[in-house]
Amino acid sequence: MVTIKDIANECGVSSMTVSRVLNGSHLVAEATKKMVLEACENLGYIPNSAAKALITKETKIIGLIIPAIDHYYTDVIKAITRCLDARDYGLLLCSYDRKREKEKDYMNYLLQGRVDGIILFPSSRSKLNYIKIVDKIPVIFANRRVLGLNASFVGIDNYAGSVKMVDYMIDQGYKRIGVIHPSLNHKSFKDRLQGYKDVLEQNSITYDESIVCEAELFFDNGYKCAEELVAKGVDSIFAFNDVCAMGAIRYCSDNGLSVPGDIGVAGFDNIRYLEMFNHRLTTIDQNVTMIGENLASIILDEINNPSLSKRSLILSPTLVAGRTI
């Protein structure tokens, strides 16, 4: 392996001079910088980032802990990465597959000096699960607020998003709106369901629990729940994510039901890959680009200025009127 000493010998300068060049020092003449950098390129020198971190106390890397790598999180990752790249930071991605123990393992792993800060999509709202990391490293939470911790947060107004969608569906003439939602352990889904209930009440429509289908928000479950809901006479379906909504649309297509002619279908997320499908889904845009950009910007600001006050940013979702409602 090529070392700094090898580069110094090649250029006829000291190891200290090479080190200054690699660390961006202004104390080295431009001609010397050029010579050293060319030697690094020619000899294939690879900087030892771990050793540098021991000296500078910085890794220039941010840890990102997410529940899963799916279409929603892919869009968030892209936005975070763009923002980090612009400020010369890298990303270390950890996906805990919605398993609390795996999330805990990743937190412990990142605390071993591998990152300068952590962006965390937490598995629970219990502060006891996160006190350890908040006390040791800058952390910002996303989508699920953990109360009682001195940490910043970025999320969206899930209640407002649901209200916008159900209002829109009723305005389009739908009255018997079926819902597909996952377990309500996550407050965001509780808020979406509450928004649905409140809009029904405001429009004098009786809430019917029999057309509220609980299932994890996967394509296959959207298909299965659509079968159940159609059998119960719904005139539309509001799925709490886009992938599940696309499963519902596939069921309708497979069974001779036109969307929106025979039945309306709406989602929640506005994930980018849906653009390739013929159906332009009516959905709620969570503004994932803004979520990712704000998460990255806030954590970097807090790393570089530890005295900054913590922030709580709630973004407003936007209704996207497609062709399925």
Image (cartoon, grey):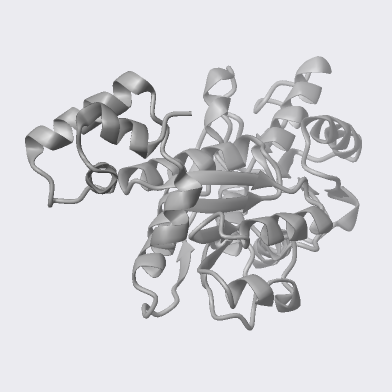
Count how many numbered circles sit on residues in the image. 0
| Near-viewer residue (114 or 8) | 8
Q: Residue at x 26, y 49 (%)?
A: 16
How far from the left and from the top, in percent, is residue 166? 62, 52
Q: Position of residue 200 (x, y in %)?
A: 70, 60
Residue 287 makes an appearance in the image: no
Answer above or below: position of 38 versus 123.
Answer: above
Image position, residue 253 (x, y; %): 76, 18
Q: Is residue 251 above or below residue 315?
A: above
Q: Is residue 268 left or right of residue 256?
A: left
Residue at point 23%, 25% (across, down): 38
Q: Is residue 73 left or right of residue 248?
A: left
- What residue occupies the far bottom of the structure in this picture? 148
Residue 27 in sight: yes
Above or below — where is 287 with respect to 184? above
Residue 53: quarter of image: bottom left
Report the residue at 70% width, 54% height from top.
106
Q: Is residue 323 left or right of residue 65?
A: left
Tell me what residue is drawn at x 60 percent, y 80 percent.
149
Residue 129, position as x, y percentages in the image:
74, 72
Q: Nearer the viewer, residue 222 or 17?
A: 17
Quadrant holding the C terminus: top right
